[in-house]
Amino acid sequence: MIVLSCNNLTKSFGIDTILENISFSINAGEKIGLIGVNGAGKTTLFRILTGQYGYDQGEFFMSKTLTVGHLEQSAPLDPQHTIFQEALEVFRNLIEMEAELRQLEHQIAQQSQLPNNNSLNQLMDIYARLSEEFQQKNGYGYRSEIRGVLKGLGFSEEEFEQPIFQLSGGQKTRVNLAKLLLTKPNLLLLDEPTNHLDIEAVEWLEAYLRTYAGTVLLISHDRYFIDEVVDKIYELENKSLTVYHGNYSYYSEKKLQIYEQQLKEYVEQQKEIEKQEEIIRRFKQHGTEKLAKRAQSREKRLSHVERIDKPLLLYKKAKIRFETRISSGEDVLQVDNLSKSFEDALLFQNVSFDIYKGERVGLIGPNGIGKSTLFKILLGRIPYNTGLIRLGHNVILGYYDQEQSDLDHSATVLDEIWKENIHFNQTEVRTLLGSFLFSGDDVQKEVSSLSGGEKSRVALLKLMLSKANFLLMDEPTNHLDIASKEVLEEALLHYDGTLLLISHDRYFLNRVTTKILELSNNGVQSYLGNYKYYQEKKKELLESVDPETVIQKTKTQLKDERRKEKEKQQEERKIKKARESIEEQITLLEEKISDLEQQMCLEEVYANPQLSKQIHEESSTLKEQLEALYVQWEEYIE
């Protein structure tokens, strides 16, 4: 059932048209992601849907029974209320109903003491109707519901009694989000709902929205969040709206397919136009009357051809490519029983793990657990208390710092790159900077004047030019727009070195990593897969293990686990190499068989029975070998 629709909707501010003739419909229960670059009109559309903005032309339909709820960043909260009291305001009608029920109970108790009281039955009827309504509206469970939502959004039981006036801006936003979710509107409009939420709270919100009975329309830059929640994408681009029937991953793939198809059609048409223009030029060049008429006829046909515009990528994209100067050994990093304390405060202990050549490892853990500190220990910038760190043969470290503290903020962009790469001339440095979207006078800007995204691009270019074979990257996607994140992902997927990264961007982690290390204050747990695999394994552990029976692992157990993990990884690498060797042999045999089959079609072969027989027998032998190789290959992939 359609609950809301727009037809040819247009909205302008002065002479600037933001939305032009957009049309869409929203069905009950749909979960939709609204995406587009900053300034595309996402928030404007939200405000039209909530009635905060009007529209210039078009048709707008909303079901009469539809209730719309949206998250207001500056929604008023009572500063004297506690967090729990503020959430209770959502259920003001139930609180009043509960008070009325208590009052009726008191009256019934009084009236029941009086003989021959005719009004008692009337009171009992009122009480029964009100009690049934109270129960239907979750009157006996709304307080538990409040607790569940507040906990899900990251508030502890102790914080429930914290007054609003003591809260930060981010905490107030979470209170407003909790109130909105508890209101349960038919249509939920969410603008960047994951702001101010940690990963656990975001994952709780994902699960909540997936099973939400109403309709959801959300704006978010968190691609993983969109992927997990929505089943449809609305993209605002160039004042228009395009619908994609799938999640973000589907949209991203489909968008690229459409672009490539449009580019193919454009290139093919350009070739045909150039071909026709060359024919026309030649006809005219010969100068005969007959050819001149034919040229004129072709020109006329060509003038009526509807020209295809060259498709433009939505964003200018930086050109990032990580290469290594030399190859490292197989064992890149070994960490054994590492611990770190600051004065008397223990940060972490019993940290042990190994990283091997070609692995892309994500380091995750709660804020403040010491992930960035561990990086600085590995780089030799700060000391550690106990343990062993061993870098492998020919390992060259490269480091990306989320704070960009390695940048000289007083230098120009040009000098910051040039001073560490003096073998380049100025033109070459400018060309490199141009590939990272710094052009013209941009290269003369001081680093201190750059935006967060621009500083990130400078730091990434420096890292790229280092040609290190072991990259340590601390929150590399911070300050990057979606297009730049995708370029970075592609670059890291094609990097032939080894990678250890810290990131809160789950989509990035899921796409890039081949192993997850979860850091706690008592060690590291390794998961041999990407972020999705880590989530699934964590879920399995939680479902299979009773928390009450969990005991602290001994150092012997931890060492045994590490030994088994290392043996497993060595076996996996051995299997991978064997499989790749078989795949190479299969490719070679298939090429030989194809070549022999082509030879058998040649006249000089099929006309020569002896030669034909020889080639046929050779082909049969190779096919038998190929079949045997496929049997081996099948064993390795199962």
Image: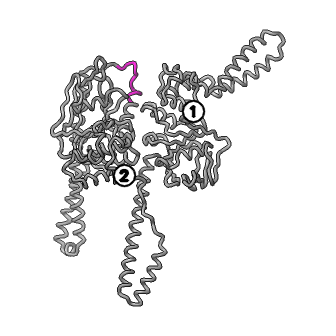
Residue 99 image point, x, y percent? 68, 19
Q: Nearer the viewer, residue 403 or 622?
A: 403
In the rendered structure, does residue 548 fall within the stretch colored magenta? yes
Q: Of the residues shown, which amino acid type is indicated by label 2?
A: Lys
Asked whether residue 638 appears in the rendered view, the answer is no
Q: Quadrant of residue 130?
A: top right
Task: Write the start and end of the magenta stretch as one range.
Answer: 540-550
Above or below, 269 against 587 in this view is: below
Mark 2 residue element: loop
Q: Is residue 249 above or below residue 520?
A: below
Residue 197, image x, y percentages: 45, 32
* Residue 149 part of the magenta-drawn span: no
Which residue is denoted by mark 2 in the rendering?
Answer: 317
Q: Residues within 10 Å of mark 2 (few under 14, many from 20)?
A: some
Q: CA distance from mark 1 to mark 2?
A: 37 Å
- Amino acid on which the number 1 mark rests in the picture: Ala
Left or right: residue 213 compared with residue 394: right
Give the SS element for disc 1.
Answer: loop
What residue would you read off at disc 1? 75
Residue at (72, 16) in percent of width and height: 105
Q: Disc count in the image? A: 2
